[in-house]
Image (tube, rainbow, N blue to C red):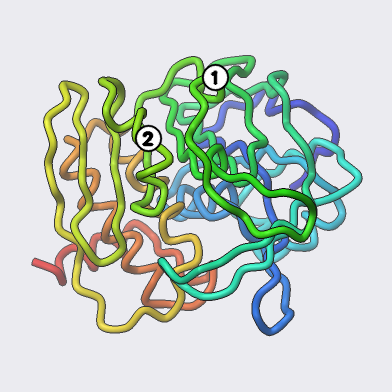
Amino acid sequence: MSNPGRAGGGGRRFDYTAVGHVTADVLGDGSRQAGGAAFYSALQAARLGLSAQIITRGVAAEIESLLEPYRSEIELVVLPSGRTTALETLGQGTQRTQRLLSWAGPMGEGVHVHTAILHLAPVARETGPRWRGHAGFVGLTPQGLVRTWAADGAPITHVPLEAQLLPQRCDAIVISEQERESCTALIESAGPILAVTAAARATTLRLGDGELRTVAVPAIGAVRDDLGAGDVFAAAFFVSLRDGRPAEDAASFANAAAAVRIEGLGASAIGSRGDIEARMRGAE
């Protein structure tokens, strides 16, 4: 599962590679679980039937332990660090607060990929704008690029997105409503397809020509656990776009994937393609 110390995926070609810190998420009851956009998105891609890889940085033994329940689904490369990124996470949705307890450090620009879809999935300013190797489609979730913190243990706050942190090329971007203000320049400039998720409200799409569309979100009876739902959306969205679906259809599929996740508990609730398609039929 793990290949510590390498800067990327070398020879094997993957369908989906997520680059970013796998985190140790410390919950309100003190328990720890795997987290981070790279983890949730790669797991969703795997459950859509893709070969999925995570390239991360941290303490290999700790990350391997966190990902033990998923070792049959995801390939893992861990760049060595003396610490693993850890987040204390409290609350849900717009009421969620987080503190950065430890940081594994930057991943640099020497990450090597060989993948159909590259998802740059930072949680704490760790990814660089360049990489080595081949990526057919590049998706970005810039949440980690607009985060800052004063010191270990300090609350995470948002700052404006710095243009020099953006990748050298990008085909699609997903942000949340909470990141909209920090990403104003990104939203207002022409560029790749961009989706803005807004919990139970409609998802807004900005197409490549600047046209705006909205895509309804399926009704959800009860939100059981929404941690990672935005990352699940991003993975399903990127995969669908790469498969050639129109942006609105891709967003509908991604909204259904997020709904499946929210209606269950933990990463085990991330759905298969069949689960998501059934959820879409149920929303019609």
Residue 177 picture location, percent across and down: 34, 52
Mark with earlier residue (2, 1): 1
Q: In which quarter of the image is residue 68?
A: bottom right
Mark number for residue 173? 2
Mark 2 burial class by Cα count in 10 Å: few <14, some 14-19, many 20+: many
Measure the alpha-carbon separation of dots 2 and 1: 16 Å
Q: Which residue is drawn at 72% across and 24% down?
A: 108
Q: Residue at x 45, y 34 (%)?
A: 140
Q: Quadrant of residue 90?
A: bottom right
Q: Which residue is drawn at 83% across and 57% down?
A: 62
Residue 210 picture location, percent across and down: 16, 26
Which element carries disc 2, helix, strand or loop? strand
Q: Compare residues 212 and 148 and report the one nearer the observer.
A: 148
Q: Do the residues labelled 2 and 1 touch (CB within 8 Å)?
A: no
Residue 256 picture location, percent across and down: 27, 61
Relative side of 39 to 215, left or right: right
Q: Locate the C terminus by quadrant.
A: bottom left
Mark number for residue 183? none
Relative side of 60 to 282, left or right: right
Relative side of 180 to 17, left or right: left
Q: Compare residues 97 and 54 and report the one nearer the observer.
A: 97
Relative side of 98 to 272, left or right: right
The residue identified by callout 1 is 164
